[in-house]
Image: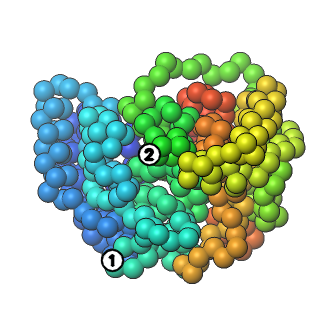
Amino acid sequence: MLTDRLYTTLSATDIADLVNRGKVTAREVVDTALVLSADRDGALRAFTTIWADSARALAAQVDAAVARGIHLPLAGVPIGVKASEGTNSFQNQRLVAAGCLPLGATSTPRVGTSWQTYGSTDRGPTLNPLNPAWSPGGSSAGSAAAVAAGMVPLATGSDGAGSVRIPAAWCGIVGFKPTNGRLPSGDRAGLNTPGVLTRTPLDATAYLRVVAPASATHPPAKALMVAWTPTLGYAATDPDVADTAQRALHRFAESGLCCVVDHPVELRDPAQAWTALRAGSTDRDTDTLIAANKQRLQVVFDQFDFIATPTTPHPPHGHDGPGAHMNVALTWAFNISGHPALTLPAGTTSDGEPVGLQLVARHHADTLLLDTAERICRQGS
């Protein structure tokens, strides 16, 4: 029998393995997820809508396929779906074809607000499972909260300026943004790319394999080189946040998988360029800024396999908003450049606030990035 307690310990790949081997049914899994969500979401408000009937109907289809001997890579895995993209998005169609069961729509910010690092429902704001006084981040707010609270092991998001990585960091989970263009973009500027929120890098790898299959990579023969920069040359990063992320990075380096070098990555602040690209109104100054940052990143990636930063320069804010803090300062440069990036839980500040460690890889090195994150987490467990 699949209990609530057991369900919350299972990763997406664990669930798929159990369903494919006939140890549990997809219907058992989705019923457990629905009961757990009914119990927990009243307080957290991660979901705006629950799709119980359609989730059960899809579970029946998965069970029928498994009974016929069909192996589905994510058989019976309940997922949260970012409300702004819905079930007809490219990535959600791929996930359903792989056996996933969309459980409901997850919260996003209200339209027209001046800040996006929160979630809104008709029952009130989405709360952070780590501390209800904190925002869960955004804009994939409900997806992060649902995964962190154990309601689903995997949820979809979209990342136009850090909207997968920021909420993942603030909720203490994994958030992955693929190389821009690998999946259909959500905006005309190509800044926004689909992404995923999970509790493990292995589940993010499973996600990528079904939404954007690629050839496998082989583990590198030597330690990977990582350039550490707490500011990218312009961000006003809190010292406690920077120290927490840096300590995590050095703990990971102790495994021998990577070699960390404090390396000044001096980019120009991309705020002007991001705003112009989003508005479709670039000019010569914007083009010059983008070209300068592109060249500077190329110089770094000629020497290093990854760039590492804190995911956000500041800890989670309350539900009254970020004030003057630019929480996207360390993420949106890579929406412009298109590099794949993920966030891993890095621990907490001296005040107990969650911090994420962002790793950024060369273009199209998504699989290497995820494989490295998986090995880092396995070594650290």
Q: CA distance from mark 2 to mark 1?
A: 25 Å
Q: Is residue 224 left or right of residue 14?
A: right
- Badge 1 amino acid: Asp
Q: Is residue 331 left or right of residue 63?
A: right
Residue at the (50%, 71%) spot, across then down: 113
Q: Nearer the viewer, residue 269 or 372?
A: 269
Residue at the (31%, 52%) spot, across then down: 86
- Check disc 1: other Cα within 10 Å, few if <14, some if 14-19, many if 20+: few
- Give percent across and percent down for residue 185: 46, 40
Q: Is residue 208 left or right of residue 335?
A: left
- Give percent across and percent down for residue 305: 73, 30
- Badge 2 amino acid: Gly
Q: Is residue 289 left or right of residue 264?
A: left
Q: Can I make out residue 346 in this image?
A: no
Label 2 sits on residue: 186
Q: Secondary structure at mark 2?
A: loop
Nearest to the eye among marks 2 and 1: give it.
2
- Does residue 37 sit above or below 266 in this rendering? below
- Does residue 304 sit above or below 191 in this rendering? above
Q: Residue 279 has which mark? A: none
Residue at the (34%, 38%) spot, across then down: 90
- The quadrant in which residue 68 appears is top left
Q: How is the image coloured?
A: rainbow
- First-in-chain label (2 vs 1): 1
Label 1 sits on residue: 122
- Give percent across and percent down for residue 258: 75, 33
